[in-house]
Amino acid sequence: MQNEREPAQGWQSNSWHATTILMVRKGGRTVIGGDGQVSLGQTIIKGNAKKVRRLAKCEVIGGFAGATADAFTLFERLEAKLEQYPGQLMRSCVELAKDWRTDRYLRRLEAMMLVADKHTGLVLSGTGDVLEPEGGIMGIGSGGMYALAAARALADTDLDAEEIVRRSMKIAGDICVYTNHSLVIESIGA
């Protein structure tokens, strides 16, 4: 007999899996990279999705993991907060997180975001988290922990932030079946 708390057999075949997003802050520069794979069960639906983009008149970069429509809704809300609080990424993110946690509609959105401006890099989640990653490195999504581990291992080398992101995303793509090598990379800062 199936436990009511456990999903039914075969539930993964209808689940969307996608995304590795990595942020590295090093040498006054912040780089966010994301892969392009979107999968449904064991099938790759799309290989060149753009999950990293510029916001707020190109002053902020962000990447998302999770449901695409949900992430676009959150990006739109974040843009509105950035217009309301220009140049204040932290405050804008805290205000978005409050709305995300308390608004009945937004609470149902399933996504995570990495966002950065010249001064700050943050992780946002639907549980109200607004975190500044330790050491300036964070990964989210299906292959996020693989990319995070690789980036941490490369952080003390002479590589710049972009090269760390590229190499770490390659490693994640080699390990995680829900991550490919079609990358979109955006940077901000020095």
Image (cartoon, rainbow, N blue to C red):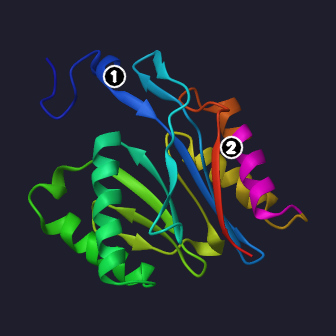
The region drawn magenta spans 159-170
Residue at far front of view: 57
Residue 151: quarter of image: bottom right
Q: Is residue 171 left or right of residue 33?
A: right
Residue sitting at 73 percent across and 78 percent down? 28
Tell me, for residue 169, which label it has, or none: 2
**Could you tell me the amino acid type at mark 2?**
Met
Chief SS of the magenta region: helix
User: If you read the primary sequence from the N terminus, does the residue marked by circle 2 or circle 1 appear first?
Assistant: 1
x and y, in percent, of residue 131 in the image: 45, 73
Q: Is residue 62 left or right of residue 40?
A: right
Tell me, for residue 52, which label it has, or none: none
User: Is residue 71 visible to the viewer in this orientation of the structure?
Assistant: yes
The C terminus: image quadrant: bottom right
Mark 1: secondary structure: helix
Crowd around label 1: few <14 · some 14–19 · many ≥20 (10 Å): few
| Rendered position, 89 above or below 57 | below
x and y, in percent, of residue 126 in the image: 28, 59
x and y, in percent, of residue 134 in the image: 59, 74
| Rendered position, 1 above or below 170 | above
Residue at label 1?
12
Crowd around label 2: few <14 · some 14–19 · many ≥20 (10 Å): many
Q: Is residue 10 magenta?
A: no
**Could you tell me the amino acid type at mark 1?**
Gln
Disc 2 from disc 1: Cα separation: 24 Å
